[in-house]
Amino acid sequence: MKSTLSTPASFSLTLSALLAATLFAGGTALAQDAGRPAALQQQPESASGWSEKAGWPARKYMVAAANPLAVEAGYEMLKQGGTAIDAGIATQLVLTLVEPQSSGIGGGAFLVYYDGKKTHAYDGRETAPSKATEHLFQHPDGTPLSRTEGIVGGRSTGAPGVLRMLALAHKEHGKLPWKTLFAPAIRLSEQGFKVSPRLHGLLAGDAYIRKDPTARAYFYGPEGQPWPVGHLLKNPELAKTLHEIADGGAEVFYTGRIARDIEAKVKSHPTNPGLLTAADIAAYRPKERDPVCSDYRTYVICGMPPPSSGGIAVAQMLGMFETRDMKALAPTNGVPSADAVHVFSEVGRLAYADRDRYAADTDFVPLPGRGLPALLDKTYLAQRASLVKDDRSMGKAPPGNPPGVDMAWNWGLDNSIEAHSTSHVVAVDQYGAGLSMTTSVEDAFGSRQMVDGFILNNQLTDFSFDSKDANGPIANRVEPGKRPRSAMSPTIVFDKQTGRFVEAIGSPGGPLIINYVAKVLVGTLDWDLNMQQAIALPNFGSRNGPTELEAGRFPASEIAALKARGHTIRIGDQTSGLQGIERIQVGGVPLWFGGADPRREGVAKGD
């Protein structure tokens, strides 16, 4: 458990006032007491730009997510005595409505959950249709489709997994009735919600969602313009869908008219029909898997196993950082130094190199050598870390040979399209449980198809478009019933000695997720930043290509220093959507402290 709260400059309450507010709030949600103007509580920040956030304290329970209305739904469940699972489900259902570009019941999710005694990993990743082949995203001559050809239309849609996964988790860990969890989303669907700046901006900038007649009629006005910020938008079709699922359970989605509607929508796309059938949807099964847990200094880090590559890649990065004095690289002015960016980026190259060679759905492709222990072997990671030189960049890193790998192990390198539109939810409850869930429809507005009030995913484009290369078959190639590789990295941290919950963290961001989450873990565990400070740090790193720096966050002198070491620099927006909750102490009193990304609309709330 962290013993102190490090205070960001923007935090207007002193620690003593914060503690007093926490002890005497009398049940009032403390998100409103963090010194932020009321307007920011009511109106999310714009789709681009930055909104300063202070972080939020609470005593008993807390939820953080990408939209205040979704957070309110999760908070409502916690206040009724629900578990973190109950809160996560209610939050997800509202995100389906208010943040349709990022996640929803037409997509999938990965969930890491601590029940107070044991950590669980739930896999709600979509699956490829039974008729899919490794040539799904290839032209007749074997060349890969373009990004647009792959994403837009029915071809890219896999069997949605999130609802059956959440139903499984609720059966095992929920307290409130399933139907109760749907009430906030149904109410907002029927009564309407105000279009946020982020939703408006994404609708204005997307060339494809308006081509779907159903989506156009819902998201756009008579003149073809997206509904303005603040417009009250109602979704009666989603309300009907949610009523049916609330009354009949998740099976209603998978075996009834909704599944048939999805099949019809996918197959009827005018230029790019897909293969998904109602039978594929009915056959979908979520899976509970063993989490990827590894030691990092005085902590245990637990993340998601394959088909997500996130848990392994984050653990590999931390294992390589463990060979260095990361505290010596702590930022002194809120911006990581050139030395810190160099080390972080070089380690990232090595982790992403292994990811692109070995990571895939392990129900189809085994991990190399001795499996997961080989990829996380401390000696192996130390050998990989020794490739990092202080004075120069290695450029493109080669994949390693984990212990037990036959040198004849030949796999090609993945070239999937991994988009950045996803969402993350964290929650902790009064019973000692906590969750970290990353949920997605993949690209912004998924496959650009809307049916029964929700968006259909394009997750199949997370498969490699090529099925083989000169090195051999690609592990993440398309196969029937297979789950595409992901970078989603829902993570929970524990104190190694006591086993106590330390923090939960995760982010959207496509393949950048791994770097985003690793940044916050280093920030909180090595650099002694609080959750909000660590989230607000500039984003940076490498995916085994250019060294990527968040635009406007690094001084020219630092960029020049990196170039002098041989780094190829790419500067651009890195719009993470990190949400995190950590356990702290203030004056000896244990508290929850939540953080939300200033780059998006998220907040945290609790009592």
Image (spheres, grey):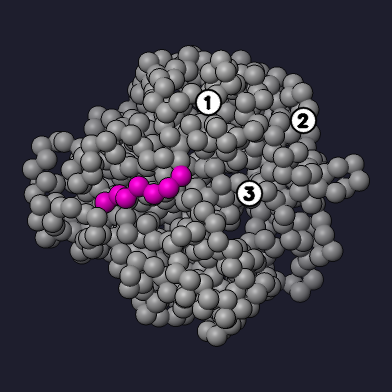
Q: How far apart are the alpha carbons under marks 3 and 2? A: 19 Å
The dot on residue 226 is 1
Q: Which quarter of the figure is the C terminus placed in?
A: top left
Q: Position of residue 112 (x, y in %)?
A: 44, 48
The dot on residue 272 is 2
The dot on residue 418 is 3
Q: Within the magenta stretch, is there residue 111? A: no
Q: Amino acid at mark 3?
A: Glu
Specify the segment rendered in magenta: 48-54
Q: Is residue 294 visible?
A: no
Q: How far apart are the alpha carbons under marks 1 and 3? A: 26 Å
Quadrant of the rendered image containing residue 571: bottom right
Q: How far apart are the alpha carbons under marks 1 and 2? A: 25 Å
Q: Within the magenta stretch, is there residue 50? A: yes
Q: Earlier in the sequence, mark 1 or mark 3?
A: 1
Q: Is residue 72 above or below residue 418?
A: above
Q: Which quarter of the figure is the N terminus placed in?
A: bottom left
Question: For numbered disc 2, what is the local secondary structure?
Answer: loop
